[in-house]
Each structure stands twice: as C-alpha cells, then as structure tokens.
Amino acid sequence: MGRTLCKLAKNSLSESLSLPLVAGEFVFYTEFTVKKEEGVFSMADKIMEQALEILRHQRYYDSIQGLMGWDLWEGLSKKGQPYRGEVSGYFTRQALAELKSPETRKVVDALKERKPEDFEDIYLKGAAHELCQRYDRAVQVPEDLQVEVRNYTGQAQMVWRDALDKNSFEFYKPTIKGLFELKKRVAEAIDPNRPAFDVLCGTVDEGIDTQRVQQLFAGLKKGIVEIMEQIAPQHEKIDTGVLETPYTHQQRRDAAFEINLLTGFDPDCAHDSQVLHGMCTGVGPRDSRIAISYKGVWGGIFTMLHEGGHARYGYSSNDRAVECGLWGGLSGAMHEGQARFYENIIGKSPEFWRLAYPVAVKHFPYLKDVPMEKFYMAQMKVQPSLHRITADELTYSLHPIIRFEMEKDCFDGKTSTDDFEEIWREKYKETFGLVPKDAREGVLQDIHWASGHIGYFQSYTLGNLYGGQMLHAMKKVLPNFDELVEKGEFAPINQWLYDNVHQFGRAMTPTEVLLHATGEELTETYFLDYLRDKYLNKLRNI
Amino acid sequence: MGRTLCKLAKNSLSESLSLPLVAGEFVFYTEFTVKKEEGVFSMADKIMEQALEILRHQRYYDSIQGLMGWDLWEGLSKKGQPYRGEVSGYFTRQALAELKSPETRKVVDALKERKPEDFEDIYLKGAAHELCQRYDRAVQVPEDLQVEVRNYTGQAQMVWRDALDKNSFEFYKPTIKGLFELKKRVAEAIDPNRPAFDVLCGTVDEGIDTQRVQQLFAGLKKGIVEIMEQIAPQHEKIDTGVLETPYTHQQRRDAAFEINLLTGFDPDCAHDSQVLHGMCTGVGPRDSRIAISYKGVWGGIFTMLHEGGHARYGYSSNDRAVECGLWGGLSGAMHEGQARFYENIIGKSPEFWRLAYPVAVKHFPYLKDVPMEKFYMAQMKVQPSLHRITADELTYSLHPIIRFEMEKDCFDGKTSTDDFEEIWREKYKETFGLVPKDAREGVLQDIHWASGHIGYFQSYTLGNLYGGQMLHAMKKVLPNFDELVEKGEFAPINQWLYDNVHQFGRAMTPTEVLLHATGEELTETYFLDYLRDKYLNKLRNI
C-alpha cells in the first residue's frame, strides 16, 4: 500500500517550497536549503557579481538539461518523449532569453573592456571568459540558423540510418554534403575571419590550431605504425581464447564496479547505472552519472574506468570553481584525456592487472586456473582493424585521425564529401592495409557527421596525447608511478590530477591547463614514449 | 571505450538546441521538436490564450521539479544533494516570479470576472480555475511564512526521528504543537474566513467539507466494525504459512510486473524502477514513474498495482487536458481512489487471482502444490492491528480515520496536541481493542505531521469510498465486471475509468468528477456494500 508523490506533485506552488517526498508510507524531507546567492567578493565589484549570478543561472539550466538528457536513457518512457521535447525547448529558450538580455549585454560589454590582470584570480577571469563566450555564441548564430541545424541534423540522422540499412553511401551523399555546408555557415557566423574548420573544432577544443594538430597527428601516426610493425609477430600469436567464458550481467557489472573502486573512485559523487550503453553526464558539481557499455564479458571494466575518469574530472572542481559557475571540466580533448588516463594508462597497464586480477578471479572463478599474464596479454592484443570503437589501445588513435584528416581536407577545399567513400577506403588501406568491403564497414560507421559533430573526432586522439603528457609530468614527482598502481596506492596519483587539472574546472583554457600541469605545450612525444615503453618493452617481457 | 555526454553538455547554449546524446559510441538524436506555443482557439480570446501559456509554463516547472524529485531516489548521489537544492530553489523562485508577475495578475483578474458559462468548454474553465488557484496560493501565503514552514518542518522531521529513537512522545511534544500552530497560520493566510482544518484538507482534496467527511467516516467505521465482528471466527483460523517462501528480488519483481500487465497497464507510459520504496511521480502527461516497495515476497504485487493505478490516472489525461495544462489527475482522494481501485477492488478480488495465479505459480513454482484458494485467503486474512501501513484491506480505512479525527478535534479546539499520545491509545483501544505498548507503536508511527502533512490522512480512506462508488457506477454498465476481471478482459473497465475520470485530468473538481462519473455525491454506502459482499459473501464461500 505504498503512497505516492502524485498527490504532492500536484499541490499548489506555494506548498511546493516545502514539498516533501513520499516514499512508500514514509515521507522524507529533502532538507535542501535554498541558498541565497551572495556575492563572493570582499571588494565591491558589481559587474563581476552580476556576471557570476548570470553564469550560475546558466549552469542551473545546464543541470536540468543534463538531468533530462540522462533521464532520457534512465527513466523516460517512449510516450513521454514528445512532451519532454516541449519542456526541454522551453528551458532552452528561457536560458537563452536571460543570456541574450540587455542586462547580460551590459555586463558582457563591461567585462570585455577588462584586461586579464584586472581580475582578482583565475576563477573570476575564467567566469568572465565563460560568460562572454556563451553570450557571443548565443548572439552570433542566428536562431533561424540554429533551428535549421537542428532540423537538418535530425533529418540527416534518419537518412544515415536508412543509408546504413541500404548499405549505400550514394544514398547519403546529398545529405552529408548539406551537413558540411551547413556547419560551414555556422562557423562563419561565429567567426568569418578564421578558417571554418578551426572554428568548428574550437567549439569542442577551445583554442585549437588544426595545422598544429595535423603535425602532431603526423608524428603520432608515424610512431604508432613503427610500433605496429615491430610487434606484429608477437601479437599475431596471442591466443584470446582465455577470455571466452559464460557470464551473467551481474557478474560483469560487479567486477567492473569493484575494479573501478580500486582506483580510489568516489561512488558518493557518481551514480552508476546499468543501462546498456556507455556514457557520462555531469548533472552538477558533485553529481556525475555514468552508464556502462557492457560489450561482451570484459568491456564493462574498461568502460567503467573510462567513464569513471570523466566522472572524476566532472565532480572534482574545487569550491571556488563551483561558486564561480565553472564546475565540470573542459570539454573535448581534456575531458577525453582524463577518461583515457584511467581507462588505458592505468587500466591497461600490467601493474594495474597485478592489483586487479584477484578481483576478476573472485567474480570469474574459472580464472584461478589462468595465469594473470595470459589473461592480460589476451586483453592487450594489437590487431589492425576497420572499426574504430572496437580497436585496441595502440591502433585506436589512428581511426579518429583518418576522420580528422578527411574533414580538414574537405574544409580546406582539397576534396569533396562526394568522394568520402573512396577517400576512406584509401586511407584505411594506407594506414592499416585493410579495405572495407562496403560502406557499412567504412564511411558509414560513425553517426557523428549526421548528428552535426563535424570537427569533433580529433578530441579522441588528442585526449591520448594529453594523457601521455600528464603521465610524463606526473612521473617527475611520482617516479614510482608503476609501483603505486601495482600497490593500489592511488591517492598521490589522484591528488596530482586534482591539483594540476581537475580542481580548476573550466577556469582556464585547455592550453593554459596543460601548460600549468606539464610545463609544456602539447606534443606527441610523451604519448609515443609511453606507447613504446609499453609495447616494445613491458609487454615484450611478460 | 564508451564516449560520453560530458563533452557535449559543456557546449555552448547555441549548440545545445541541437544537442544530441552520445551513448557509447553512438549518438542518438532525440528528435524532439520545440513546439510552438500556438493558441488552441478558434475565437480570439487573448486573455485565455495568455492564461494557457502561463499555466503550461507552470507545468513545465512542475515537470522538472517532478523529475528532480524522482531523481533524488533514482540517480542523485549523496554529495550531489546540496547543489541540487540550489537548482531546485532557483526554479521554484523562477516559477513563482512568473506566477506572481503583474502580467499574470492582469490575466487572473480578468478571468475572475468571468462566469462559468463564459468558458467554451470544461477545459478552459478548468485551466482558468487552476491558474487562479495557483496565483492565489502564491500571493496568499507570504514568502516568509513559506520559508518558516520549510525550515520548521525540516527541523521537525529530525526531531521526530530522534523521538522515535528515544521512543518518547514527550520529546516530540513542543515540536508537534509548533507544527499545528504553524499550519493554522498557513490556513488563515489562505482563507481567514473558513475553518483552518477545512482549508488545510482543501489543499489536498479541493472542496472538501470536513463535517461531511466526519459523517461519512462515522458510517464507514460502524459498518467495518460490524463486518470485522462477523468474520473474526473465520479469519482467526486462516493459516498464512503458505505465503512463506524463500525468494529472490528478481523473482518478486518479475511476478509483480507481469501481474500488473494483466490489467492492461501501458508500460510505454510508465517507467518502473527497482528502488526499494513505493511511490509514483508524474513527470509529464505521458510520463509516470513508479517505484515499488518490496515488503517481503508478496507486497510488491499489490504496490505495483497501487502505483500502477496512480500512474495510469497520471498518464491518461486526454489531449485537450494536456494542451490546457491540466494533465496528471486530481490530487488527494481522487488519485488515491484510482490506485486503490487497482490494488484492492481488482487486485484483491478472487476473480483476479483466478486469472493471476498461474503467473504467480510460474515465478514461484512451489505454489503449484498450493490451491489458489488457500493462497488467496492467506493474502486476505483480516486482523485488527496497531499499524496502518501493514493493515489488511478491511481494517485499513480505520487507521487514517483515527488520525483525521484527532486533527479535526484539535483544530476545533476540543483537544490539544499535548494529549495526542493518550488520545491515540484510547482511539486504538476503542476501534481495535488494542493498545500500543509505547509511542513508537502508537502516536509516533507516521512522519506526516512532522513533514507538515496535516489535513492529509483523510484522502487515504476517502480514496476507498471513491473506489467503491466508481465500482457501483461501473457495474451498471458492466454488470459482468467480475467475469471480465477473471477473464482478463480489462479493456472495458479501463475504458470506463478513462471515459468517466482519467481523461479529464484536472479539468473538473473532485466533486464534479465524482458527480459526472457516478451521478451521485460521495457516500460511504457503496464501499461498504462492496466490503460486505466481499467479506460476508464471496470470501465465506471460498
């Protein structure tokens, strides 16, 4: 005879301030306080105070949109979707209305006249930057164009699905052409004076220079291919049969959860879900949601570590960053870097598996007859392939590079989307010596372009470079890094990431954070060093 | 290697209109359209159009608060709560700001001058009523008083928990006195010219007349006690041992879910959760969430049917009710009536168990050696008790009556909260012949008063009366009701409830709906008839 929230949710609003939650027969009071928005200044800086208030409000809107996005997977039932569209649309417009208001404009104009040294600290400087950037984007891209993009990408994804069904790039051709043209118009609306592709990539990775990225990627590709050639004979021989076992969902989930906890992950900040796809969404400063993609029996472990890395970065902004509306971490490569650090650099190291293997054995008792080394090497097997998502750690980076190069050449006017199928085939042949047998195995494999994510792929591979560079810097103060991992002493590792990256949230740009954390600008050297040490040294001696 | 939402959630707002969701490596487009808010009129009625727009906006706020409330159980982690309080508080204030704005006031003033016959249909009349009522509540109760209530009830619940720990009503005395005084002030703020208790009950059950309720309850009590006396010898002999079995959570959940589906429940409108408490929350017009309290092995079945009834009422408002902002159903007794109809009138009938028993046997194979009748009678055993939540169907109604009588006498000035422990003991002795051995077993058993739910209990028992009266009316057109249930032909039953109650949402008042559906004002007669037929007739012949 459980009672319900229904009757309460329908009380008048004057009651809703004290709305308790009826759970079964028990009514729990939420004990939330409505925090007064006080200024965080000692000095009287009215403009900055207003800026922080506006930005905090924008983040509240981010939070409910984040929650609605998460709920789309976690709770929203099919027939609830159309109304949800109305709700989400209403709050998008409300947020934009506040952002584009004359009051915000006044604040933004005043902030733009300040010099960097006019700000009391990096957080106020960061908040001013964040607000101005949000404001600019809101006013730069006309609402008509936004609507056009939304409608076009909505349609394009359906065409993409049909093209997949038909296994036909031909069918997709006019649409992908339209997508690239439309995004070019968006880029020109944001900044007509910079190359469109740089502008688009810049909405994901702020301050990116795509020419420099191209150089980095060229060096990286060369290095990876060299490693691949050297290890091919060893890896061809690796037998992965040891990974095959019957399993239950509970078993693989519990193993993944427990192994992730070994890294000092704080489950009090991050709800983990058991829906069947991997994602992380930041709903608030101490509120990350991770959902795990359980591909086969073992995939969940690495997804949990990956999403756990995102979650950790998402929930570790310091209090000052939170009060300045800068929680959640930087988008793009920096976020990806944190995720891949835990997934790969830690989670795919032999040291970590010496630590974690007993947990795996506990959940999969058949492993007690399997030497850790055999299990580990089977997990690590390198194999050139046609498919990005399922690629191993070493070859993975090359897949996004192919897409990035295709996008850049196209925006640079060297190629046309019409030729993408053929270009794709050539690039896979050149990189991996493999040719997709059809469009489905090739150019149609990612939904990103259809959903408007053009200028996005580089962040996957850049994330690896960030990870390698952070590892290098970290090892200067933690030369016993490998030993710490093997012993499960993650506190100093997590603390380093917190001190140097996580705590700042969005206060600095990616370039500033990297420079602050590692003392250098981005290079491919350290990630390649890491790969060489791993594949040419460590894994050869196992 | 799942990708994440994090990086997307941090895109600029101008991007967020077309924000896709990255799930694993797949980006699904949500395909939401931002519905233009067009008027729903043929005639030019600017005021009404504005009213609908304001009301729809208020419902959007209801939706996100509902989602946040649901998420509190489903996803929000511990450390995410303080920020959630900020977010929730911000949107509460935003909703109130629009509701209390001069623009709304102008619309409300204009609507108040209209006569009932000035409205085109019941939905526009209902929308006008709903908006005026929300507006009035928002302006009637001063924000200071709202804050005082919120803070006091927050505190009071902690005192209540301590009092439970200490098993001491003495400890709770000053607090419960304060609670009743505070709620009296709220009632006076809403309407100084009506008895405070009527005003408070009226915020739950609109238009309630507590004197009339007292009469209904007196008649009901007398009738139930008579039945109890007559069936005591039979029920004392019922052996419930047959209900004892080992079980897994999955087993009981699957049985409950499948049995609920037998009643024609639409899972596409209602997400069911496996958290461990029973509740239903309406997040949108086609979006109800139910969570099930799994008390022991069998409780989940009845909770699922109960919450399913709430959900069904919540998601079955017709399109006109939705577009007029009137989705979700009426609060209080009417909602409870729908829940208890499915839980008890259907779910605890022998006909239903003839239908559902094979499903129970499928999930609990030991039952194949147990005759349905034996299982059913064990579930139905009537036993006077001291505890409301665990009471059987027959005696349940008496428990809320006791609390209602205590509240009413106190507000009428006949008693003081100081004497509540003693009054409680007397009333339980008089009603059930049982005396609680301590405060915990007695006056401290419900959290409702501490959370400010004073004037709330009547809706539980009134819900039973609504159910009985609906059954009576339904049987006039569906005389083969029992047979339909036994055959699992729920379409005509569900259709009757839809046609006569559910579809209207909040367009009419409870009194109007009941009159429309049953042709009569509320009476205890039909529910008593139902109980007599069940306990003195049907159950005697099993």
Image (spheres, coloured by chain):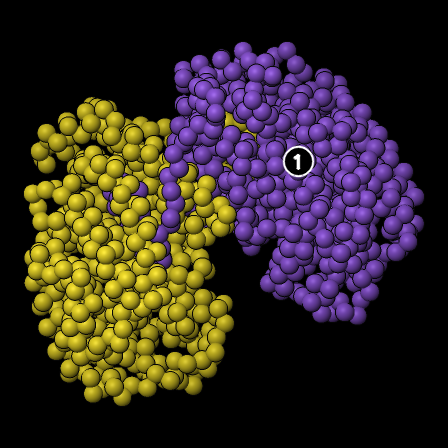
Chain colours: A purple, B yellow
* Rendered residue at 25%/36% (across/down): B143
Circle 1 — which element? loop
- x, y percent for residue A2: 33, 62
Taking the spot 31% from the left edge, 38% from the top edge, the residue there is B59
Q: Is residue A537 left or right of residue A454?
A: right
- Which corner quadrant of the image does residue B395 belong to? bottom left
Can you tell which quarter of the image residue B466 is in? bottom left
Q: Is residue A113 above or below residue B95?
A: above
Q: Is residue A445 visible?
A: no
Q: Which residue is mark 1?
A: A501
State the residue in front, A242 or A416.
Answer: A242
Q: Position of residue B37 (x, y in %)?
A: 33, 29
Residue name at image x 39 percent, y 69 percent: B295
Residue placed most toward the observer, B294 or B180 = B180
Foreground residue among B68 and B375: B68
Residue B29 drawn above or below residue A101: below
- Residue A222: image x %, image y %? 86, 33
Q: Is residue B365 left or right of residue B464?
A: right
> What crowding class fits label 1: few (fewer than 14 Cα within 10 Å), some (14-19), or many (20 or more)?
many
Image-based side of A264 in relation to B405, left or right: right
Quarter of the image with the C terminus of chain B is bottom left
- Chain ID, mark 1: A
Image quadrant where residue A369 sits:
bottom right
Q: Amino acid at mark 1?
A: Val
Name the residue nearer the viewer: B370 or B225.
B225
Res. B274 in view: yes
What x and y, as percent, mark residue A223?
87, 35
Q: Residue at x 42, y 35 (%)?
A: A88
